[in-house]
């Protein structure tokens, strides 16, 4: 899966345990600019370095996997958690942003008269 947005926050590396580390990235996803969404992604272990050059305010494309797990608390109740696990981040520069804009055909002059060699019957 992938999504494009503007970087809102990049965390420092978080050492959860001696052998597990993670880093969080929040992007502003503005499919509807009136109501932007702030989506949090998580990179773990060696992928935390993917965010070393990512800067707040930068437009990025984030590739991720949707992860879910079940957990049973001390009372025996089951709870469910979802994580958006990041595996690749691409900065979208001005050249790439221009490619995302659809290319339209140049305007056609429709004021030409039918007598100018056009033999179509309509």
Image (cartoon, helix red, strand yellow):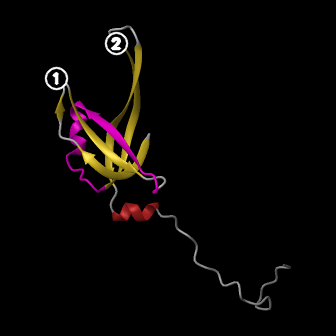
Image position of 42 (left or right of 108): left
Please state which of residues 67 and 103 is positioned toward the viewer in this rendering.
67
Helix, strand or loop status at disc 1? loop
Q: Position of residue 99 (x, y in %)?
A: 44, 62
Name the quarter where the N terminus is drawn.
Answer: top left
Badge 2 local density, few (<14 within 10 Å), some, or many (20+)?
few
Seen in the picture, residue 82 relative to 33 is either above or below; the reply is: above
Seen in the picture, residue 98 relative to 2 is either above or below; the reply is: below
Helix, strand or loop status at disc 2? loop
Which residue is rendered at x = 23% and y = 53% of the image? 55
Q: Which mark is residue 17?
A: 1
Outermost residue on the left side: it is 18
Q: Position of residue 91 (x, y in %)?
A: 31, 53
Which residue is rendered at x = 52% and y = 64% of the image? 102
For marks 2 and 1, the one nearer the N-term is 1
Q: Which mark is residue 7?
A: none
Which residue is rendered at x = 32% and y = 9% of the image? 74
Q: Report how far apart the C-alphas of labels 2 and 1 lie in the structure.
A: 21 Å
Badge 1 local density, few (<14 within 10 Å), some, or many (20+)?
few
Name the quarter where the C terminus is drawn.
Answer: bottom right
Please state which of residues 109 and 51 is positioned toward the viewer in this rendering.
51
Q: Is residue 95 magenta?
A: no
Seen in the picture, residue 36 relative to 78 is either above or below; the reply is: below
**Quarter-wise, where is residue 2 in the image?**
top left
Image position of 35 (left or right of 83): right
Disc 2 target residue: 73
Q: Position of residue 17 (x, y in %)?
A: 16, 23
**Which residue range is magenta in the image?**
33-58
């Amino acid at each position: 899966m992938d999504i494009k947005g503007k970087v809102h926050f990049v965390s420092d590396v978080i050492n959860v345990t001696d052998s597990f580390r993670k880093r969080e990235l929040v992007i502003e996803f503005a499919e509807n600019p009136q109501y932007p969404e702030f989506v949090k992604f998580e990179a773990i272990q060696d992928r935390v370095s993917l965010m070393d050059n990512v800067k707040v305010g930068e437009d990025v494309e984030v590739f991720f996997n949707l992860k879910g797990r079940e957990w049973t608390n001390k009372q025996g109740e089951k709870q469910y958690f979802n994580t958006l696990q990041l595996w690749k981040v691409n900065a979208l520069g001005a050249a790439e942003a221009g490619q995302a804009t659809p290319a339209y055909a140049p305007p056609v002059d429709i004021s030409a008269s039918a007598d100018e060699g056009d033999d179509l019957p309509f």
